[in-house]
Image (tube, rainbow, N blue to C red):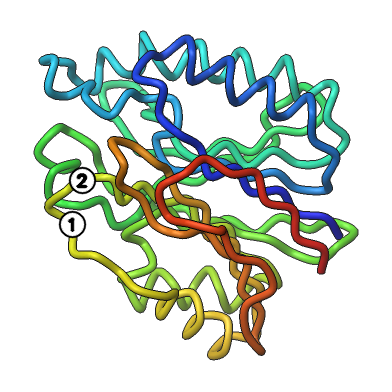
Amino acid sequence: MRIALYQMMDRGDIGKNIRAACEMITKTSADFMCFPEYFTIPADYKEKGKTVKDAWKEVTIPTINALRRVSKKFEGYIVGGSVVEKDGSDYYNTCYVFKGGKIVAKYRKMNPIKEELEMGIKPGNNFLSIETEFGRFGVLICADCLSKNVVDKVASKNDLVFLPISLTDPSHLRVEGHPISERMAQEYGVFVVKVSRVAGGIGVKSVVMSPTGIIKEARGCCDEELMIAVI
């Protein structure tokens, strides 16, 4: 099984971020390809006075349309990091999963941080577990991994857990190593695929973690990198 992780640099522009993601998909051969949390939203989007409603219209719709199109040319599953989803009058931090030109599943972040809640992002309540020829896989989004209840319900039902994150805020505490991914992999006997975003010279090393240790780790925390892990 080949897993691609795109530790993606924010280009500061919605269109450029979407194009970078799509171009990397077309260059990559893998059974799974995963992107970071909020990977097409520019890091300074909120600072420009933008809202979750703006993000849905300006970022999410073109991102979903682009990934749906490019997934027709990709043989595996695309785990689309996360974007802002609108459902009625509610907004969620949602990971869409694509295959063969279709959205085959979606997962809503269940443990949004305070900043997200203040912006109008609501907690999701769906646990994802997709059966594939490689086993079952699920998704956690960033701070979900800090909730024992959420981790237990996802990791206990899957063989592979994708964890898109976006620790690009200077106020976030610096994290050395991969203590949460390592603990999850060991405790539940799963493979954890953590994919980080890079913006403004800030990021966290992406990693593929097995129950016995690191399989593949990014060379650095703050540079763009495509990683391929075979497990």
Which residue occupies 82% across, 21% down? Answer: 72
**Residue 94 pos. (x, y %):** 44, 38
Give the alpha-carbon distance from disc 2 to disc 1, as whole Å: 6 Å
Query: Which residue is denoted by mark 1 in the rendering?
Result: 172
Q: Is residue 176 left or right of residue 187?
A: left
**Residue 117 pos. (x, y %):** 15, 43
Which residue occupies 30% across, 69% down? Answer: 175
The kind of residue on which mark 1 rests is: His
Q: Is residue 46 above or below residue 205?
A: above
Which residue occupies 85% across, 22% down? Answer: 73
**Residue 16 pos. (x, y %):** 49, 13
Secondary structure type for disc 1:
loop
Q: Is residue 107 above or below residue 64?
A: below
Q: Which of 58/130 is in front?
A: 58
Query: Which residue is denoted by mark 2 in the rendering?
Result: 169
Which image quarter: residue 144? bottom left
CB contact under 8 Å: marks 2 and 1: yes
